[in-house]
Amino acid sequence: MSEPAVMRDVVVVGGGCYGTFYAGQLAKAKERGKARFRRVVVVDRDPACRARVELGEAPDRAFVVRQWDDYFGELLGGAARAAAAGSPDYIVPSPLMPHLMFQWVLARARERWPGRAIDVAPVPGEPGTPYDRTGPDRTRYVSFADWICPTHCIEPAVCPAIGSARTWEMGDAVRGLAERLRAAGEPVHGPALFVCRHHVFGVGTFAVDAVLEGDAMVRAAGESGAAAAVLVGTISSCHGALNLLRIGAAQAAAG
């Protein structure tokens, strides 16, 4: 018998159809002894979101009515590493959400270095994925799937869409992209990757610790005062959202 997934708080992004499914699956996993957690927190700006209507509040389920970026600004800004806090906290992303974790590390960089240019640059290079599109906000969306994936796919070793082995891994592709950019002379650090993996009962998560480590990577990249860039991605095995955070050089102090 497999050990239960042990978490502290689990934050579900959105209370719509996806969030309702994820929160419900987490409750089932806990009931059946497959997961242990303190509470599930569903974050949605709608006080009457579907998850609240269908699932309701419970001793281990709470609802927060806020914009996502405001909520994560507070949560992550005050978060402690799991080593200090005990069991780690996790985030359950939505397939339809913007690149929220990048937006947080971007905001942190601007707070940290108010006198330096902090910009979102286009992600250069070729990741080698069949699907590759850049959004208006310069987020580059990449995927190894050029087909419609099954809903709530957990990305197993055998891809259910094609019925054969999954021979790709997005983390390898993004790390390879960063290495090629550095080899071409680009001052690129990272990548800082927030990797969503199947955790329990069809629910994919990444740890809050991973986001804090990404923020630490950005801080380290800018500490020397030289211009730098950090490749940041929220990814799974098959799909990803990538951004390039560019840090301008620090101004020399006036003599």
Image (tube, grey):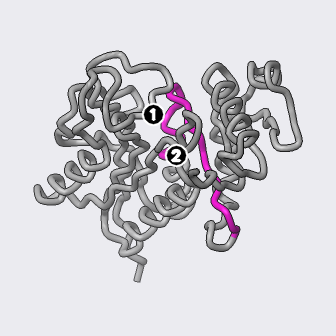
Disc 1: which residue = 154
**Does residue 250 appear in the picture of this structure?**
no
Question: What secondary structure is marked by label 1?
Answer: loop
Earlier in the chain: of badge 2 and badge 1, it is 2
Marks 2 and 1: which is nearer the front? Answer: 1
The correct choice, above or below, for 15 with respect to 194 in the image is above
Check the image and name the residue furthest to the top: 148
Q: Position of residue 168 (x, y in %)?
A: 24, 39
Quarter of the picture containing the C terminus is: bottom left
* Residue at 48 percent of width and 37 percent of height: 99
> In front: 225, or 95?
95
Q: Position of residue 62 (x, y in %)?
A: 82, 39
Disc 2: which residue = 101
Question: What secondary structure is marked by label 2?
Answer: helix
**Does residue 78 appear in the picture of this structure?**
yes
Q: Amino acid at mark 2?
A: Met
Q: Are marks 2 and 1 in contact (CB under 8 Å)?
A: no
Residue 95 part of the magenta segment: yes
Quarter of the image where one finds residue 199: top right
* Residue at 58 percent of width and 51 percent of height: 1
* Residue at 76 percent of width and 21 percent of height: 49
Q: Position of residue 65 (x, y in %)?
A: 79, 33
Q: Position of residue 75 (x, y in %)?
A: 69, 52
Q: Is residue 126 left or right of residue 77?
A: left
Check the image and name the residue furthest to the bottom: 255
Q: Which mark is residue 19?
A: none
3D distance between C-alphas at marks 2 and 1: 21 Å
For label 1, count other residues whose C-alpha is less than 10 Å away and answer few (under 14), some (14-19) or many (20+): many
* Residue at 71 percent of width and 40 percent of height: 32
- The magenta segment is 85-103
